[in-house]
Image: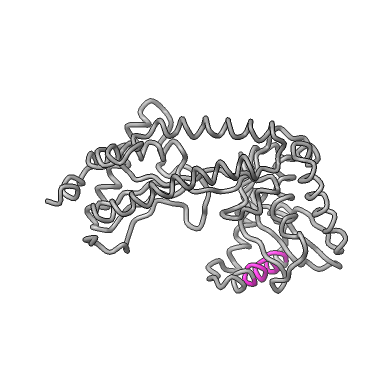
């Protein structure tokens, strides 16, 4: 049995944000690997001193993930669906890369919006009115209630977001007969449009509106700004047919208890094998893009993922245990002394 309860634990993250980014803030340069190693070892020492069950670094960059794996952290990957801008000049330019049946399906979905008497527009954060933020908050609450969640964001939060972040915020608004009936919140970075919250009036359903407001408008904004990527949040294989292809996300974990570490290690090995199969099947068989574009994407991603894996020492369980034992404070736990 594990010697410690799973909670409390430590986590290195951006709260409520399933977005990849630097988690160990190291300035680039020749000393970066040494500083990153020192930070990681310090995190391990703090975990041991506090006698908590574990340490979790979630959504780090691929490079950080590889480096932490080489230092003995257990590694995990997940899948998110991202749209990538291949130098498109317009939405139609993007559609030209898709199979004919997929192009037709997306065009029909977009046409159905107007047929329902709906009009959709993108509003920069600096132009969103107080009334619109209040309306969006009611949509957010309706979505939370529908999914039996917890409304941890307040009405004041949305107003502050618009006033503090300005045009780094984009609200996609759907209106029917002059009334706002649905909206989606996006954050706009220097290299990506990030889809965040969505909701509709009273939780109502409008045919294909979710796809238009959350996915297609984000794509149009990324093309207009020349941004390379759209990340529309976690989960959802339905995004695949709308041009959002599967990408790996990463996390790294330090578990000092040998029993817990062994159990998690077995699970991760099984999960990784299934994840690799799932990613390849989704990419090669589920992609809406033409065959040459799909193969180009697949080869590019395989090369990128292979280079990351080669940077990590965790290619076998023996190597993993060896690397883990090199972390400060772990020899006692590994030997059981």
Point 24% across, 62% down: residue: 4
Percent across and percent down for residue 301 are 55, 34
Q: Is residue 115 above or below residue 278?
A: below
Looking at this view, is 256 or 223 the one in front?
Answer: 256
Looking at this view, is 1 or 84 the one in front?
Answer: 1
Q: Residue 246 appears in which quarter of the rendering?
A: top right
The image's colouring method is one colour
Looking at this view, is 61 or 332 the one in front?
Answer: 332
Point 71% across, 67% down: residue: 200
Percent across and percent down for residue 226 are 70, 36
Magenta stretch containing residue 208, yes or no? no
Percent across and percent down for residue 73 are 33, 44
Residue lying at the far top of the rendered structure: 30
Provide the major secondary structure of the magenta segment: helix
Q: For the magenta stretch, what is the residue range? A: 132-142
Q: Is residue 1 above or below residue 255?
A: below
């Amino acid at each position: 049995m594990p010697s410690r309860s799973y909670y409390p634990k430590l986590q290195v993250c951006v709260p409520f944000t399933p977005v990849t980014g630097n988690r160990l803030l190291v300035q680039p340069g020749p000393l970066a690997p040494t500083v990153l190693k020192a930070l990681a070892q310090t995190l391990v020492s703090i975990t041991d001193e506090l006698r908590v069950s574990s340490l979790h670094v979630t959504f780090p960059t691929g490079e950080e993930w590889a480096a932490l794996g080489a230092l003995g952290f257990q590694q995990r990957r997940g899948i998110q669906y991202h749209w990538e801008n291949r130098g498109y000049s317009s939405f139609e330019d993007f559609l030209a890369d898709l199979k004919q049946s997929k192009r037709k399906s997306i065009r029909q979905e977009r046409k159905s919006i107007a047929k329902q008497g709906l009009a959709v527009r993108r509003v920069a954060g600096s132009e969103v009115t107080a009334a619109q933020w209040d309306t969006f908050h009611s949509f957010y609450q309706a979505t939370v209630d529908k999914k039996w969640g917890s409304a941890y964001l307040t009405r004041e939060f949305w107003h502050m977001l618009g006033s503090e972040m300005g045009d780094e915020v984009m609200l996609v608004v759907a209106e029917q007969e002059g009334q706002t009936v649905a909206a989606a919140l996006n954050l706009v970075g220097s290299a990506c449009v990030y889809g965040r919250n969505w909701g509709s009036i009273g939780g109502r359903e409008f045919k294909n509106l979710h796809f238009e407001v959350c996915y297609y408008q984000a794509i149009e904004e990324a093309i207009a700004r020349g941004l390379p990527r759209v990340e529309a949040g976690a989960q959802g294989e339905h995004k695949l047919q709308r041009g959002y292809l599967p990408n790996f996300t990463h996390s790294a974990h330090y578990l000092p208890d040998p029993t817990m570490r062994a159990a998690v290690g077995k699970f991760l090995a099984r999960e990784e094998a299934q994840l690799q199969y799932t990613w390849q099947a989704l990419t090669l068989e589920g992609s809406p893009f033409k065959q040459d574009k799909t193969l180009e994407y697949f080869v590019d991603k395989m090369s990128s993922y292979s280079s990351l894996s080669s940077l990590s020492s965790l290619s076998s369980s023996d190597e993993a245990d060896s690397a883990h034992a090199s972390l400060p404070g772990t020899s006692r736990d590994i030997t059981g002394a």
